[in-house]
Image (spheres, rainbow, N blue to C red):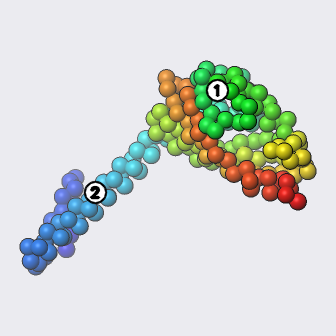
Amino acid sequence: MIYFHDGSAEATVQARQSPSANEATKMVLQTFRSAALAAALLLTASQGFAQTANTETVKLFYQAFSQNQPELLDGVLAENWEDVPPNEGQEIGRDAFKPFVTGFHQIFSDLTIVNDAIIDAGETVVVRSTISGTQAGTFAGFESKGKPFSVMAIDIHQFKDGMVVKTWHVESWLGGLFQMGAFE
């Protein structure tokens, strides 16, 4: 039988076993205890990271797209912000990125970005979002057929002094192109 003492991570084992079996049992208990402690720490940490100033700042990034307000990026992105990978022809920096916000609204009518999940780990904020809209202009070399799309995006934002200094991103654009009828 295994008994856990209240308030401690120690375990008492009552068994009729040889010394080697007792050692094996202790190793199993140590592993179990470590795994339980790690799981408890992860749960506690994820609840503690729920809403910080960085979370609120990064939400403005998506609001800038959804509301076609690139000026909101002034309060989100550092002046020398780096986008990885950059869009075709995109230079480093916040001001070089702003035209892409308005450009997306020209290509996609009713563009919206919904934040489905945000993981805030201090100076790093990860966002899983859904980008949706209707293709109204040429995208990735494909003419518009006026079809709607919805794709998933994952962004990892690195913060320094309250501003995003670097963003890594990936979107499921291949699926979006199929939805928009690009390969018909």
- Residue beneath disc 2: 34
Q: Is residue 73 left or right of residue 25?
A: right
Q: Identify the amino acid type marked 2.
A: Ser
The answer to whether residue 75 shows anywhere in this view is no
Q: Position of residue 53 (x, y in %)?
A: 52, 30
| Nearer to us in this view, 83 or 156 | 83
Q: Position of residue 88 (x, y in %)?
A: 73, 36
Q: Secondary structure at mark 2?
A: helix
Q: Position of residue 158 (x, y in %)?
A: 52, 33
Decide: is 156 above or below 70: below
Quadrant where the N terminus sits is bottom left
Q: Quadrant of residue 26?
A: bottom left
Q: Is residue 87 left or right of residue 137?
A: left
Q: Quadrant of residue 109?
A: top right
Residue at 55 percent across and 28 percent down: it is 165
Residue at 68 percent across and 27 percent down: it is 91
Q: Secondary structure at mark 1?
A: loop
Earlier-in-chain disc, 1 versus 2:
2
Residue at 64 percent across and 38 percent down: it is 85
- Residue beneath disc 1: 92
Residue at 22 percent across and 61 percent down: it is 30
Q: Position of residue 35 (x, y in %)?
A: 32, 58
